[in-house]
Image: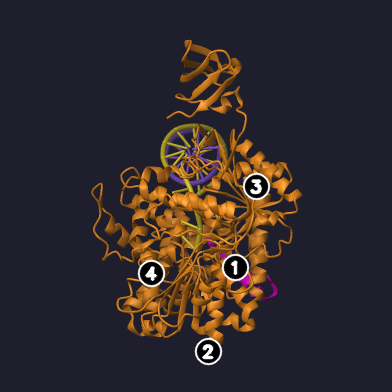
Chain colours: A orange, B yellow, C purple
Amino acid sequence: MFELNHAQQQAVEAGDGPQLILAGAGSGKTRTIVHRIGHLIAAHGTAPHRILAVTFTNKAAAELKGRLGDLIGDGGGGVMSGTFHALSLRFLRRYADALGYPKSFQVIDSDDQRTLVKRMLKLRNIASDRLHPAYLIGWIEHCKHAGLLPDQAETQMWSGIDLRELYAEYQAQLLQLERMDFSDLIVNAVRLLREIPDIAVALRARFDHVLVDEYQDTNPVQHEWLTLLCAEHHNLTVVGDDDQSIYGWRGADVRHILDFEHIWAGIAVGTHRLEENYRSTPSILKLANAVIHDNSNRHVKTLRPTRKDGIKPEWQVCNDEYDEARKIARFLNARRDQGVAWRDMAILYRSNRQSLALEQVLRQEDMPYQIIGGVGFFERLEIKDALSFWALINRCADAMHLLRIVNKPKRGIGLKGQEQVAAQLGASGMRASDWLDFLAEGHGEGAAKKLQPLAQLIVRVRAKLDQLEDYGLMTMLEETSYINSLQSFGQLEAESRLENIRTLQSYIEITMQEGVTPIEFMDRAALLQSGEEDNKDAEQSQVNLMSLHRAKGLEFDTVVLAGVEDGLLPHQRALDEGETGIAEERRLLYVGITRAENVLLLTSARQRKIFGDMHFPLPSRFIKNIAADTLHCKQANTVKMTAISHGLTVGSSVSHPSFGEGVVLELEGSGNATRVSVEFERVGLKRLMLKYAALKVKYPPK
DNA sequence: GCGGACTCTCTTTTT
DNA sequence: GAGAGTCCGC
């Protein structure tokens, strides 16, 4: 694609006011945004720094800047871009005091958020079977997605407990801890715009044009964020595709994009449709269209292919997840032999857990791969510990950081001691780092006294901070014996954790050289997903493994969608939810299919171990009825059931070489001694030693 | 206060 | 099947 097509050109050159760009998958969406920004700068004379681009991930923001740089040179650097969360944090760093927060507040991650809520419920003697912490968090998040503060939310009673009251208390505790959770960033940024007139005026005057990507995935509070920010000039360009809305669970509301034309009362809205797909072969698009066609409540559109030819997508039915992984490996190896680089291949899955079997097999096969996402780097225990130490040295630690490492490694400060420390720190009214200085001078009593050596060490390390490129990280971790204490995890795990700490160290060194302040570093750690920023130097080409959600906005020559089964895609949780949930799962599959440029493989397994239990999923309802001329299905030979590890369960339909078809009624014993009772259609009830029975599984239990 | 052994639970997706 | 929470003996 060299020139812009007509629709793209129209969108790029559209004038002021709200603009809606409905852009199908692979229709040159990013290209259109980049060119529109370029056009605003070059033709309208808008200053780059007065343009704001909101992207869905930090990676997308970086890519946007890169492409803008290619298009218009250095000027592109001035455009402000980032996620809702990152931009909100930026605003709040400047204005948080207007909301009663110190400007030095920090972000709390979901893990610590959960701990906090648990402690809160425990203190109130609310058992988890009466009110589950996750339920409360879910409800609070739900309020926040809608932009509702505790006093605006509707009272919600749950087993006689007022959730709204708990929400209020949770917020009070966060405020006291000087922390905001992820959703607070957005809500509080909106509060600046809603409640503080001077700041609202300043923020509204800050930008002349705002552009938003992946608009179908905005939730109501993000929507309010945008409309308030653009209340003056209405220069809001939104780009999105309702068929790719996959964040309903995060409060995203497709109506924002479906009804975009109606929410601007009296203001003309420009609408542009990009339906020509430049990415995928017609065979892949045919499957994509067939899958999404069944969803109702969408802007009906059809992606029009612009490319020629193509290989028909394949659906490979495998025996289990390992068979699946091996078949995928073989498939990708063949692609590799055809000259496709590893980095141009991706394996996408519904649930991060699916990466386990894939990883094992890829490692066995010596295929280079990288996992994007999963357990976030900055959420790892050793990284959070290390960063807490680091924050203390660099004077940007708060009570949570201190309490995290107060007994790491063991200093004889147990639960009681930690309470004491917390109480004394609280009573002192000092910041955590200052309080440690105070302890270093010999103050403090009880458990706090035991912190004196740590406090003095911090003072000593701080004195030579300017000689340490990592700003004291390794020195602290070595001198406190934290590194040594990792050995308690066992040799192997200790090494991998140390490796992670080394990665953090080099990341700190590189970042701090850019002139970033410690608190800015902490912000990045809080909001950056691992794999977004690092791996820049990873020159070697690797197969990409990631969740379908992570894959949004990306494209690959060859794509494998693993685990296309009922229970995984659509996910069981969505099946339980019903219609809305299933429609979103279908869009998820659509997103996955449309990531592929040339070659697409779907796989499913007949049996799969989930949480230690064997499951016998049916093929995904989304592809079951797709015509063979659209999707070519290949079945693996069934495997003999010779061991209990194959995990028959009561209700499984099986077939036996001489007895024929039957249903498992009972399993007794274990291991080699397992006996199975099967009611056979032809010969009735038989009790068999599973070991010798040579049963084949036919259907899953209901 | 610590560590080991045990039980129990909870299993989607992400900023 | 992993992680968190709990109990118990030192």
Residue named by callout 1: A458
What kind of element bears circle 2?
loop
- Give x and y (percent) for residue A662: 48, 18
Q: Measuring 68% from the left and 65% from the top, which residue is drawn there?
A: A536
- Residues under labels 1 and 3: Cα distance? 27 Å
State which quadrant residue A530 falls in.
bottom right
Q: Measuring 46% from the left and 63% from the top, which residue is drawn there?
A: A241
Q: Are marks 3 and 2 on the same chain?
A: yes
- Residues under labels 2 and 1: Cα distance? 52 Å
- Residues under labels 2 and 4: Cα distance? 27 Å
- Give x and y (percent) for residue A340: 72, 54
Residue named by callout 3: A493
User: Left or right of A331: which side holds A261?
Assistant: left
Q: Residues within 10 Å of mark 2 (few under 14, many from 20)?
A: few
Residues in magenta, as a range: A450-469
* Tag 3: amino acid: Glu
Quarter in which the C terminus of chain A is drawn: top left
Q: Are marks 2 and 1 on the same chain?
A: yes
Question: Which mark, residue A223?
Answer: 4
